[in-house]
Each structure stands twice: as structure tokens, then as C-alpha cells.
Image (cartoon, rainbow, N blue to C red):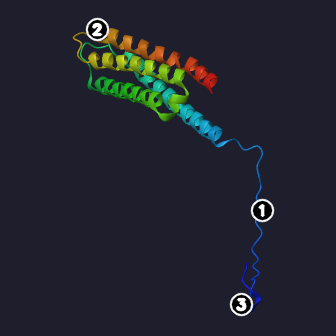
Amino acid sequence: DNLPADLKGPHVVTSQEIVIKVVDHAGTVARQQMDKLNQQMEKKINEVQNAVNEARNKAEQQAQQQGKQEDMPEWVQKQLERMEKELAEAEQKMEEAAQGPEAEFHPKTAEKLQDMAEQMESAQKKAEEIAQQDTAQERADLAKEVQEAVEQVAKEMEPLRKEFNEER
């Protein structure tokens, strides 16, 4: 400081020593953001996988139950409603993963998820028609179609995961 001596200057001030360490192996901010987006997408893919597995299980149950009795028992109707809910949830998770902020960094994966969501939506519409069928055989046939559609989506999960890992 430039305070003259007759004004009790210059002042001497001391401060605490601060040590700054530079980490050489830390990634750039952009790389850290990409890693975070990759982790978010991977989490969403895992959620989609779980939802598809649940939907597949419900579809298998329906394919086995439909057609056994001419009248649809109330418990089979409740299972049908649960299956429809699982199909809708799986489709919603696919849509969210395909349209989230991390999807723009994984366009192939997002496109594949969008296609799978459309297939799941189609299966869901078929599932909604099961209860409206007149005969047990018609319900059984439609339930089998739903099961096959969901099974096809489930089979596409492994190539989707592989494609995602290649995009990383």
C-alpha cells in the first residue's frame, strides 16, 4: 500500500496460505457432461428393459389364460388390465428415453427407441381389443399376437444396448 509513514503506513498484511492442486487426470467439463448424459441414457435403457420384461411377463400370462373359458372371469379381466398398464408404462419409458436431452447425443439409439415405442403402442392397442372379442378363441389369438409383438420388442433390446455402447 502507498500510505506515507507519517500516516502510519505502509500497512503490512499477512494472509493464510492457500494450496491449489491441479488434477491432471480430470476430464474437461464437456467430457464430464457427456459422461453424465451417457449414464442417464444407460439408466433409461435399463428402465425400459425392466418395463419390457414386465410387459412380456404379463403378455405371456394373458396368452396362457385367454381361450380357456368362453366367458372371461373377473380375475382374467384384472390381469388383462394390468397387462395393458404394463404395456403403456413400457411405451412411455421408451418415449421418454427417445426424447430426453441425452437422446440428441445418441440419435441411433433414440430412433430405435422411438420405433420400439411405436411397436409397443400397437401391441397396447391390440391388448385393449382383447376384452371386446366375442369368442374365447378370438381373445386367445389376439393375446398371442400381443405376446409375439412384445417378445419382438424384448428381442430388440440387446441390439439396442449394443448400438448404444458403440455410440458412446
Q: Which label's residue is closer to the chain start, 1 or 2?
A: 1
Question: How dense is the environment of label 3, judged by Cα within 10 Å: few (below 14), some, or many (20 and up)?
Answer: few
Query: Is 129 left, or right, of 152 in this rendering?
Result: left
Q: Please tell me whether mark 1 sits on a helix, a strand or a loop.
A: loop
Question: Horizontally, is 150 left or right of 159 in the view?
Answer: left
Give amino acid for label 1.
Answer: Val
Which residue has dot 2 on it? 138
Task: Identify residue type, mark 3.
Answer: Leu
Cβ atoms under marks 3 and 2 closer than 8 Å: no
| The C terminus lies in quadrant | top right
Whichever of callouts 1 and 3 sits on the residue coming sooner in the sequence is 3
Could you say where residue 24 lies in the image, as x and y percent from the top left?
78, 45
| Tag nearer the camera, 3 or 2 | 3
Q: Which residue is mark 1?
A: 19
Q: Residue at x 34, y 8 (%)?
A: 141
- Horizontal and vertical percent for residue 33? 60, 40
- Mark 3 and mark 2 lie on one chain; the one further toward the N terminus is 3
Q: Which residue position is annotated with label 3?
A: 7
Image point (24%, 12%), residue name: 133
Residue 128 at what x, y percent from top left?
29, 20
